[in-house]
Amino acid sequence: MDRWCARCSFREATALDSSDTWKEFDQNPLTHSAAHHLVAILDLLVDLGYARVSDVASQLKITRGSASITLKRLKERGLVAEDRNKFLKLSDEGERIARSIQAKKYVMKQLFTRLLGVEDAQADVDTCKIEHLVSAGTAERATRLLQFLDARSPAALAFLEAFRRFAPPSPAKGEKHADESNLFRYFQAAQEQD
Amino acid sequence: MATPETFNDLNQLFAEEVEAALRYLHLAVTIKGLDRLIIRDKLIEGMQETLEHAQKIAERIVQMGGIPSLDINVHLAPEKLTAREALSSALAFEQAALDAYVEALERAKGDLVLEEFLRAQVALESEHVTEISLLLED
């Protein structure tokens, strides 16, 4: 069923009834903030070999109080553990989630910059908004598309070249000044077809 | 003469206290039902005390020749919490503030006035943490 989702503002065409997608968004098992905390711990463990609440707070530019509240919930869910010397560790599941978010972030950013021609800084912002929400299935399809492009087959190169000719990248103008007329025209035409 | 690191430490403590005051306020007004009778006043008291601490730190910064700078980014989502959950949250951010004071105290070694100020704050924060821990005991 192809229906409009009031919350996500996306046209969904999936087996899932998309009128319920906003509920799934709200009930996502990991909040935006929690996702950042997990990835921050993973980064700190890789870079420093240890992670404490103060390090996480410093990395995320938030207060320790704020970090400790989110970490408390992650501990309660068994994703993070703290030893008696106050060093943080990720559980197997916590590490799996953090690595998955990192990988999705990378793939989505590649998709935005290399395929869509979105500027690096804007791609960072947009990726940040979806990295923990995009499904594994969608991330896998995006990965396959990138692999198709990486293979540099004549078909892939022709596709990229044709797309860039059709829609050359333009400098980002910021959300308020963005020209959305093409977006709206396309959407209106699609509505009329329906 | 205070170093930029000292001012950074004090501004971070200032942020911890202001944010804790906002969290106390949010917890106090969010609690409903009978739990409201039990801990609302306690949470309001916590808010007032943390605001006093914030004010003390800001004044300390000014006395040392600096200008307080406040950098907080807090989103307090609507949540239905029990008294126990609210106290448990308060314990988490009070403990975080205590740890921040202890670390700042270690870095302040040699500055006797600042050391004394931070030592007094550590004592007060320890009292808060102990009291909330006692309330959470069965």
Image (cartoon, grey):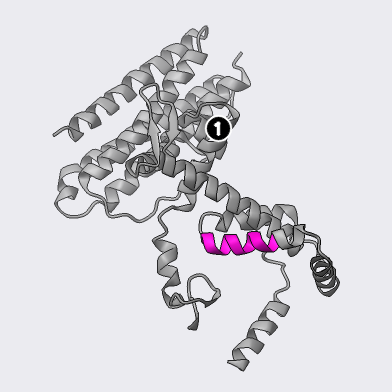
Q: Is residue B68 visible?
A: no
At 64% from the left and 55% from the top, the residue drawn is: A107
At 27% from the left and 23% from the top, the residue drawn is: B127
A144 part of magenta stretch: yes
Furthest toward the bottom, the residue is A193
Q: Which residues are magenta?
A: A135-146
* Direction from residue A182 to residue A34 in the image, left or right: left
* Residue located beneath label 1 in the image: A44
* Helix, strand or loop status at disc 1: helix
B136 part of magenta stretch: no
Q: Quadrant of residue A111?
A: bottom right
Q: Is residue A183 above or below residue B74?
A: below
Percent from the top left, x then y, of residue B79? 32, 54
* Direction from residue B112 to residue A119 in the image, left or right: right
Q: Is residue A28 above or below residue B83?
A: below
At 47% from the left and 14% from the top, the residue drawn is: B106
